Image (tube, rainbow, N blue to C red):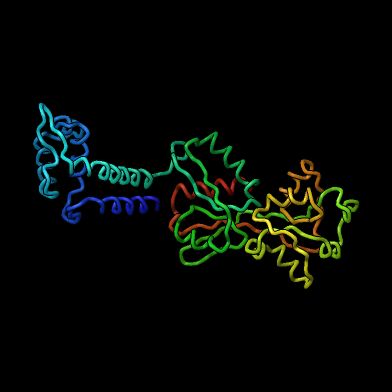
Amino acid sequence: MIGIFCTFKFHFVMECIHNMNLRNLDLNLLLVFEAVFSERSITKAANKLALSQPAVSNALNRLRDTLNDPLFEREGKGIAPTDEARRLAPVIGKALKAIEKSLEEAGDFSPEDSVMEFKIIMSDAVEPVLMPALIRHAAQNCPGISFALQPMDPEKLRARILAKEVHLGLFVIPINEDKIRSSHLLSTQTCIIARADHPVIGHKDTITEDDFFSLQWVLIGDSLRRASSFHQEAKAKGRTRRIVCKASRMLSLPYIVADTDLIGVVTSNIAERFADQLGLKIFKVPFKTPPESWHMIWHDDYTDDPAHAWLRNQLKTIVS
């Protein structure tokens, strides 16, 4: 499917070429143009393309007729491009490179030799769990692969997947429809954190449901919280919480909790990572809550793409 994008890109670039009827154009003529432009010689271009000199001359004449421009003129012992040829050269070069890239990526994917960047929407609730291992594997086995992580915005996730702005999204709610696919990846458990010397619960080993609803909170923002099964269970209790601060990222919560009397809820891996560093105390939730299930979400066009399948398999291997 990456090849489809490159084909689109090629046609977009070619629209920039004036006075050219693409329906009647033999695209091989563009290869001849590029060779003659780079070599400044019909003979050298013919050798580069493994063609005869008359064949290159004939192809160049056909292109001249199509574009209604001489393209190259005699200059000393060689030839020099016209102003029109100089204008067209970078555009044609980009078009040919787009086609070449498309054909390369349409073949078997070789992660060891590939050079590409995966764009992934990922919440910081799972980013520390998945990315270190994925980066280590890529560095050791496929150094040309890199990752661009983008923040989670639940309200825009579906549209961004449909637009193929990203290769993959990780979210707590699966999306399965005509052009979108989902697959369960992992489950995470939530817990409550407070500073170790919290004036109300610092001396306790457990907290009660009354503690849960009477203390002041720092939570993630509304759109992320609405998608969380933990917060849905808390809301189902029919009691309100005093929310003092709404943070944009889960990784901000431990730092805010460490220096205030607020409590927060984070995934257990984040709580354990910051507990000693920030002087935090970890508590179990005082009522039954299901784990958060995280799902890989992607455009169906990527389902059979070898590179995308490699990425999904690597993430499954990490969590297994």
Q: Above or below — where is 134 with respect to 24?
A: above
Q: How many marks?
A: 0
Using residue 209 as the reference point, say whether residue 187 is left or right of it: left
Tell me the quarter of the picture where residue 23 sits. Answer: bottom left
The residue drawn where x is 30% and y is 44% is: 94
Residue 90, image x and y in percent? 27, 42
Determine the residue positioned at 47% across, 58% down.
Answer: 299
| Residue at 49 percent of width and 62 percent of height | 159
Residue sitting farthest toward the right:
203
Identify which residue is drawn at 40% across, 51% down.
2
Extreme residue toward the bottom, this view: 238
Picture quadrant where residue 54 is located: top left
Work out whether residue 183 or residue 165 is closer to the camera in this orientation and state it: 165
The location of residue 272, given as percent across then percent down, is 76, 46
Left or right of 112, for residue 271? right
Q: Which of these two is toward me, 167 or 18?
A: 18
Image height check: is 277 above or below 287? above
**Which image quadrant is residue 243 in?**
bottom right
x and y percentages locating residue 41 in the rendered image: 15, 31
In the image, 13 versus 143, the foreground residue is 13
Depth order, front residue of 47/240: 240
Where's residue 239, x and y in %? Answer: 79, 71
From the viewer's perspective, tell me whether residue 246 is left or right of residue 153.
right
